[in-house]
Amino acid sequence: LDPFAGSGALFLEALSRGAREGLALDTNGEAVAALRNHLDALKCGTAQLVLGDAVRYLGNQAPSAFDLVFLDPPFHQNLLQDACRLLETRGWLNPDAWIYTESESVPSSLGLPGNWRLHREKKAGNVHYALWQRGA
C-alpha cells in the first residue's frame, strides 16, 4: 500500500520484488498516469491505482489488509499522523505489518500508534525515515 505514491518508486520496487498485489494513491493526475504507464510496461496487472486524496480514502473501511505500507506524504501538512491513525483503526494493516515512513520530524516525536515498534531509523539531509512493525 502506497497512499502518497508520487512517482511510485517504492511501490514499483515492492511489486518487482514479488508483492502479489498493491494499491497506490496520489492526488496528481500526471503522476498517476505515469505510474500506470510503468505498471503496464512491467505487466503488473495486480496493482490498483487511485487518483484521489489518501487521507479521505484511508478513512474508509479497508477492503483488505496489507503487509507492507509506504508513507511518504508531503511534509508540513500533518498528513502522516492522520494516515497512521486511519491505517490502524480502519483495518488497513495485517497484525504484523511493516510500515515505512518518511517525515520532516524525528520518528519518536510523531505520536504514531503505540503498538508500532520502531525497528530502524535514519536521517538523510532534512528527511527522517523509519521502519516500524505493527504489534498486537
Image: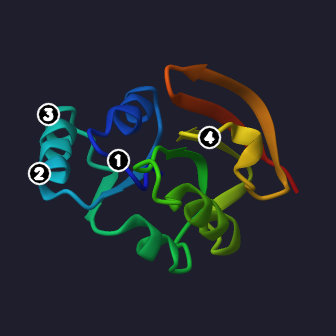
In the image, what residue occupies the spot 88% across and 57% down? Answer: 136
Which residue is identified by label 2?
30
Question: How far apart are the two marked residues, 3 and 4, measured between alpha carbons?
Answer: 36 Å
Question: Mark 1 or 4, which is nearer the eye?
Answer: 4
- Residue 125 as seen in the image, left or right of residue 40: right
Which residue is identified by label 4?
105
| Labels 1 and 4 touching (C-beta < 8 A) | no
Mark 2: which secondary structure?
helix
Depicted 88 relative to depicted 132: above or below:
below
Question: Mark 3 or 1, which is nearer the eye?
Answer: 1
Which residue is identified by label 1?
5
Q: Nearer the viewer, residue 37 or 59?
A: 59
Question: How far apart are the two marked residues, 2 and 3, measured between alpha carbons?
Answer: 17 Å
Mark 4: which secondary structure?
loop
Question: How far apart are the two marked residues, 4 and 2, measured between alpha carbons?
Answer: 28 Å
Q: Amino acid at mark 2?
A: Glu
Percent of width and height locating residue 131: 67, 34
